[in-house]
Image: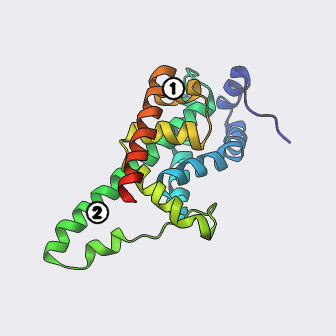
Amino acid sequence: MRKPLNTVLHFRYFVHSGLAFFVLFEQLYAEHKDRVFNLALHYVQQTEDAEEITQDVFVSVHESLSDFRHDAKLSTWIYRITVNKSLDFLRMQKRKKRFAFITSIFQPGIAESLDHRPFDHPGVHLEQKEALQKIFQCMNELPERQKTALILSKIEQLSQVEVGAIMDLSPKAVESLVQRAKSNLLSKLKAKD
């Protein structure tokens, strides 16, 4: 079993040699693919979409690995890429829905095909599906920064320091965002009852 990549010297050696770069990337992928997939899944709640985001994340990591500046831990950098790719994906979905809505004015039936995607989270048992679907729907209505802080701190169980590093915020700002997110989430859940 390979040791995790945790030293700058070890990292720089791999980045500067051709074949070793492939070994580094393969190891990075093995170490982080599940975390990246799960984080993306918390954003999109669709297995196929989370797989697509995971693929995009690792394409970006591969393309920019040699530019990694060591300002943060490698895992923090990968988390940040995942959050950004997930948010980009959701923005693209919203644009598609808006376009479908406008198109549906002239061609009925198109908007419905985009709006009714089933909740597909592989870690959810059937009896919990309805309740969790409602929670995730309400989470999806939160502002992006609140949603990200909530997912990273409460679902991914990262510390406020780690969440702050990923979101480029102070731990106090993260704490504030999480509190606002929890408050807004509770309000939205009560409104749906």
Residue 168 in view, yes or no: no
The residue indicated by pointer 2 is 97
Pick the quarter of the image with the N terminus: top right
Q: Residue furthest left?
A: 106
Q: Which of 34 and 8 is in front in this view?
A: 34
The residue at 72%/20% (across/down) is 9
Dot 1 falls on a residue whose secondary structure is: helix
Q: Nearer the viewer, residue 109 or 156?
A: 156
Residue 103, above or below 37: below
Mark sitting earlier along the chain (2/1): 2
Amino acid at dot 1: Gly
Query: Residue 104 appears at what percent x and percent y?
Result: 19, 73
Query: Residue 59 appears at what percent x and percent y?
Result: 53, 47
The residue at 48%/27% (across/down) is 174
Disc sitting over residue 164 in the figure: 1
Query: Residue 146 appears at what percent x and percent y?
Result: 42, 38
Q: Is residue 129 left or right of residue 11?
A: left
Pick the quarter of the image with the C terminus: bottom left
The residue at 48%/41% (across/down) is 83
Q: Residues within 10 Å of mark 2 (few under 14, many from 20)?
A: some
Residue 47, above or below 63: below
Q: Do the residues labelled 2 and 1 touch (CB within 8 Å)?
A: no
Name the colour scheme. rainbow
